[in-house]
Amino acid sequence: MLEHLWYKNAVIYSLDLESFKDGNNDGVGDFEGLIERLDYLHALGVDTIWLAPFQPTPNKDNGYDISDYYGVDPRHGSSGDFVNFMHKARGLGIRVIIDLVVNHTSDQHLWFKEARASKDNPKRNWYVWSDHKPSNWNKGMVFPGVQKATWTKDPKTGSYYFHRFYDHMPDLNTDNPEVRDEILKIIGFWLQLGVSGFRMDAVPFVLESPKPDVDSTTLHYGYLKELRRFLQWRKGDAILLGEANVLPEETVNYFGEAGDGIHLMFNFFVNQHLFYALASTEIEPLQKALEATREINPTSQWAHFLRNHDELDLGRLTEEQRQRVFQEFGPEKNMQIYDRGIRRRLASMLGNRQQIELAYSLMFTLPGTPVIRYGDEIGMGDDLSLKEREAVRTPMQWSSEGQAGFSDSDKEVKPVISEGIYSYKQVNVKDQKRDPNSLFNWMAFMIRLRKECPEIGFGSWEIIPVKPKGILVMRYEFKEEILVFVHNFTAKGEELVLTTRQAKTQRLIDLINKVESIADEDGRHTIILNAYGYRWFRGGE
Ligand code: NOJ
């Protein structure tokens, strides 16, 4: 029955309305624009859209600072436009998941305005306060170098409020039952409007109970079960996809031992080791990361990604490994951020088509659900002149026309990339659609292929050890179907021998090229790999 779980083989596409497509030409992306582009996403082959926050916001953290959970920010349209969008997406068989950002609100949220008004305001305990300056006021910042504190004095009452992120995003007090009820209401509201689930923001921080002067608090994992229970009462197949960059041994707390916690989690651990493998050609740490995150309940699932809307976080690597990735993919100080990451897009980091294909081919074959970041399907670059993570959030490049075909407005709200090899004149959807060899067409092909390989999402897997260095071989099995994937991380071609004992199949049918390998008399398959080459095989007798 596992194959009834839609999220196990979904192909998720993440986008931010603001920078996707401007439909009403005021310079800001909106639902009208996204509706126009749904056919594009359908043609690309994605079946699930993850929408970044689109609710009313002062927009000081890319919309992750919400000031009303029950609406649509007027810059992006109206609630009516949202429902229109949901209707068309459903017609195309595309599911929608949205961000659930409940660790904090914007300081412009009415709840916080009330909470800060006086100590006896009914909303006071919706947030986390201290009457004295906590000794740990400048500990535990998520954005070091940019954020100065986690406890900030509020002038009105003279107390300090807690904020895990920026000081304009006060943390909600999730220990308060009223807050918990409200969070369920938010979940129920959007489910009723048709979403298939939530990408849950900052999960570990939602679970903590911050106290003044106390550096670390215990996390209340049971809360995730509570959320899931409610979610499933309302909509049986809705999911929670957690953002939690945690160590492998901690993940069971999030998934729940019985698979009764959150359904999916981004695999940050594998992501970081994958970039290390790309940078160094040393694949052993990646293999270990895959093994370390292997044991999860059969109904739970990893989400694999290459890049997202934040920095490439390398905080889980050793110092030496991190420096190696910096050296290869982000050597300049301006490319690095928060002492741990790189604020660049995939294409500009890797710089060549072969390695981009290798990285995506690998992502599609990792045990889990792939998540693609808008613009990466055409190889968009970044704008390092923008502050912090804005560098990787420039408007989608639709064509070589003014403002990249993103908007017809004269007003440029978000600057498009107009210089250099990643400019919209060089990199855009319209040109790539017409070019059979483009990255876009390659990506659409690979998505289709991934959909034809549901064994990846459902099956069991093993890593087959091979002699040549820098080559990862993974084998999947599900209901007597066998898949074998080979990825060469090195810049040199290689000939690889796989025995029938290892592959557990006599024939290897190449799913990308029209070749088939039948094992020789000694039971050996000889596999030719180009520099950064990748091969997908289906077994057969
Ligand atoms: C994680 C989000 O991915 C990031 O963009 C945001 O700044 C923080 N959470 C705070 O919401």
Image (cartoon, grey):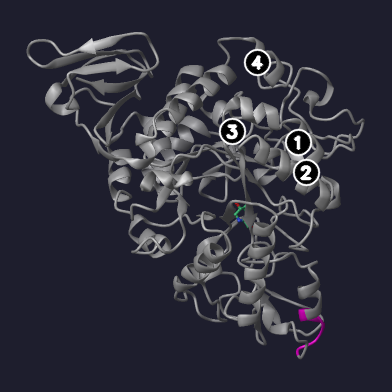
- Magenta residue check for 116: yes
Label 2–label 1 contact, CB within 8 A? yes
Q: Secondary structure at mark 3?
A: loop
Q: Which residue is mark 1?
A: 35
Q: Earlier in the sequence, mark 1 or mark 4?
A: 1
Q: Residues within 10 Å of mark 1 (few under 14, many from 20)?
A: many
Q: Earlier in the sequence, mark 4 or mark 3?
A: 3
Q: Nearer the viewer, mark 2 or mark 4?
A: 2
Q: What stretch of residues is rendered in magenta? A: 115-119
Q: Which mark is residue 433?
A: 4
Q: Which residue is mark 2?
A: 84
402, above or below 54, in the image? above
**Type of residue at label 1?**
Ile
Which quadrant of the structure image shows residue 420?
Answer: top right
Left or right for 33, reference 392: right
Q: Nearer the viewer, residue 253 or 94?
A: 94
Which quadrant of the structure image shows residue 22?
Answer: top right
**Type of residue at label 4?**
Lys
